[in-house]
Amino acid sequence: MTSFAQVCGIHDMPRTAACEHLLERIASQGIERVRIGWCDLHGVLRGKTLMAGAVADALASGVSLVSTVMLKDTSDRTAFAVFDGSLAAQMPGFGFANNLILLPDPASFRVLPWAPGTGWLQAQPWFDDGTPVALDTRRALQAALVRLQALGLGLRCGLEVEFHIYRIEDARLDPQRAAWPGEPPAVSMIHPGYNLLAEGWADLADEPLAIVQRAAQGLGLPLRSLEIELGPSQVEAVFDATDALTAADHMVLFRNGVRQALRRAGYHASFVCRPPFPNVMASGWHLHQSVVDASSGVNRFCRDTPAPGSSPADAGHSLSPLGEQWLAGLLEHARGMAVFCTPTINGFGRFRPHALAPQSVLWGRDNRGAMLRVLGRCGDAATRIENRIGEPSANPYLYMAAQIHAGLDGIERRLTAPRATDAPYAGAGPALPTSLEEALAALDGDAALKRAFGEPLMRCVQRVKRAECERHAQAADKDEWQRREYFGRF
């Protein structure tokens, strides 16, 4: 009998061997249950927990998933009228809360270090006829990487992720006060802030930071450092660079794992940009990127000597022609990609003058006020571009795919970059969007990005994020709306 995995065209001899090895490992390690995880539009893992004996069938036949989870906004409300018969014409394959099927990847198996006897498998959704679901954000990144691969190129990404950790004082799980969304927990700080990189504050926060370390390393993530950030209860995690798809998978696993491991110990980790407290410091997600030769891994941004006649303010002083084109593409599509990098209403509060966050579409050489920070010198294999527009709750697959589509447009059109800024807050350059509504309008006007991502995904993103904006506009207490919508959930 043909399995569903065979119908989908993904079950070959290597996968067969991987499935057999996985089942042996589950038995030998005494795994009792396995979580089947899938990343939604908002970068949050969803899925089902199977008993160990059900994993073999899931590998062959998949696990059913109600299709509405792909159409939900940040409050978990479905943004489409799924019981309206016209939905199938708008979103082929969707309607009436039908089933999709998750197929796990046996090579993705991990034992969760904070959950005894529990394993985890990454999965992607398929329609019941064996065709892939285009709304899957991981597939969006895979499709972008195929475009790069066609040119013999790959993308390497390094993650710098700021976030907040708080001690839970009251979980606020009183059923008499349940609402949609529910109340976030009442919390206290793990360090008082305003003492950047202070060793004393790191020691004060040692217990939760140790939990973060054990969770990340237990998942096999390339954690490089944990640091005390400037804001109260704010920290940063830095990871070694990997290929883009692996880096995106790592970001999803890190956020999910850290939140769960800390919660079990009485802490609340929040990747929302601006937690709902006075004097809070906004968190960013700085994405380091370099294009490499797909075969050799050689950094294609690097050049041996400066371009003739160039000065440090010229991109060609340290970036190759391809690197300058990539940089120019990121600048060209900065406003259109903003919704993928900063996808919440909360995140746009970060773009303030002199706040180590960008305000304008500019690049600078080792300049933390510019949107794009170019790092490296001639002959430096670590030459890279750091995009500072992201917020830590962004969906990593969409964030990275946007970089690829923008950078490739720069390469294909042979764009040139303007001179570097030395005054990132002086008002030069186009302004970045100042709201989610403005970012959505910018994306709607970016034909190249829309074409690259494809109509089904763009229709879903626009509808879901506009539903979020509409509910925020209708909220009587907008601060309370953000506390419930974001702080307790992201």
Image (tube, rainbow, N blue to C red):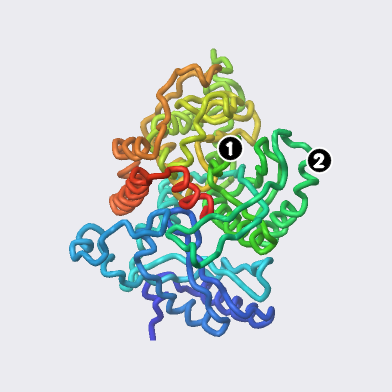
Q: Is residue 49 above or below residue 198?
A: below
Residue name at image x 43 percent, y 42 percent? 345
The local crowd at label 2, few if under 14, some if 14 to 19, many if 20 or more residues have their Cα within 10 Å, is few
**Residue 207, how many percent across, how many down?**
76, 54
Q: Secondary structure at mark 2?
A: helix
**Residue 11, how many percent across, how many down?**
45, 73
**Considering depth in this image, is 476 or 293 the residue closer to the camera?**
476
**Considering depth in this image, is 203 or 57 the residue closer to the camera?**
203
Residue name at image x 54 percent, y 15 percent? 310
**Residue 271, how many percent across, how many down?**
56, 48
Which residue is most to the front?
176
CA–CA distance in space, label 1 to label 2 = 23 Å
Residue name at image x 34 percent, y 71 percent? 130
**Residue 2, how many percent across, how many down?**
38, 82
**Considering depth in this image, is 220 or 281 the residue closer to the camera?**
281
- On the image, numbered disc 2 is attached to which residue? 200
Which amino acid type is shown beneath numbered disc 2?
Gly
Q: Which mark is residue 278?
A: 1
- Do we see residue 33 in this rendering? yes
Which amino acid type is shown beneath numbered disc 1?
Pro
